[in-house]
Image (spheres, rainbow, N blue to C red):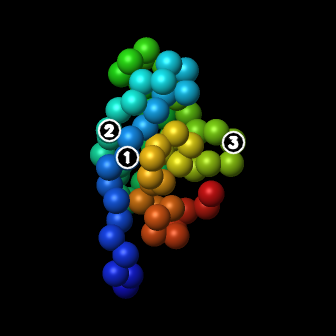
Amino acid sequence: MSDKKIVLESDITCPKCGHRSTETMPEEACVYFWSCPGCGERVKPREGDCCVFCSYGSVSCPPVQNGDCCK
């Protein structure tokens, strides 16, 4: 078992309008879609990323932090 602390909050920035929102990420899953509270855009990850937090967040998703998810 790893002693590495997993960060669950990430500041996600909308690629369309630039709105920034602090969100809590699920511990065991990647988030494929996110709706921007600023403009309502439904955002999905960039090609090659597993989730919106890996593409647009200040912190990668917990599975990637844990080394359990492909990126």
Mark 3 highlights which residue? 47
Looking at numbered disc 2 in the image, what kind of residue is underneath it?
Thr
Q: Position of residue 68 (x, y in %)?
A: 51, 68
Q: Nearer the viewer, mark 3 or mark 1?
A: 1
Contact? badges 2 and 1 (CB < 8 Å): yes
Q: Which mark is residue 10?
A: 1
Looking at numbered disc 1 in the image, what kind of residue is underneath it?
Ser
Q: Residue at x 48, y 24 (%)?
A: 18
Q: Secondary structure at mark 2?
A: strand
Q: Residue at x 43, y 15 (%)?
A: 39
Of residue 29 and residue 21, the one placed in the foreground of this image is: 21
Q: Secondary structure at mark 3?
A: loop
Q: How much space separates mark 2 and mark 1, taking CA atoms?
A: 6 Å
Q: Residue at x 33, y 70 (%)?
A: 5
Q: How much space separates mark 3 and mark 1, taking CA atoms?
A: 20 Å
Q: Position of residue 30 (x, y in %)?
A: 47, 50
Q: How much space separates mark 2 and mark 3, taking CA atoms?
A: 23 Å
Q: Which mark is residue 55?
A: none
Q: Which mark is residue 22?
A: 2
Q: Say left or right for 38 vs 48.
A: left
Q: Say left or right for 20 vs 67.
A: left
Q: Is residue 53 above or below residue 68?
A: above
Q: Residue at x 56, y 43 (%)?
A: 55
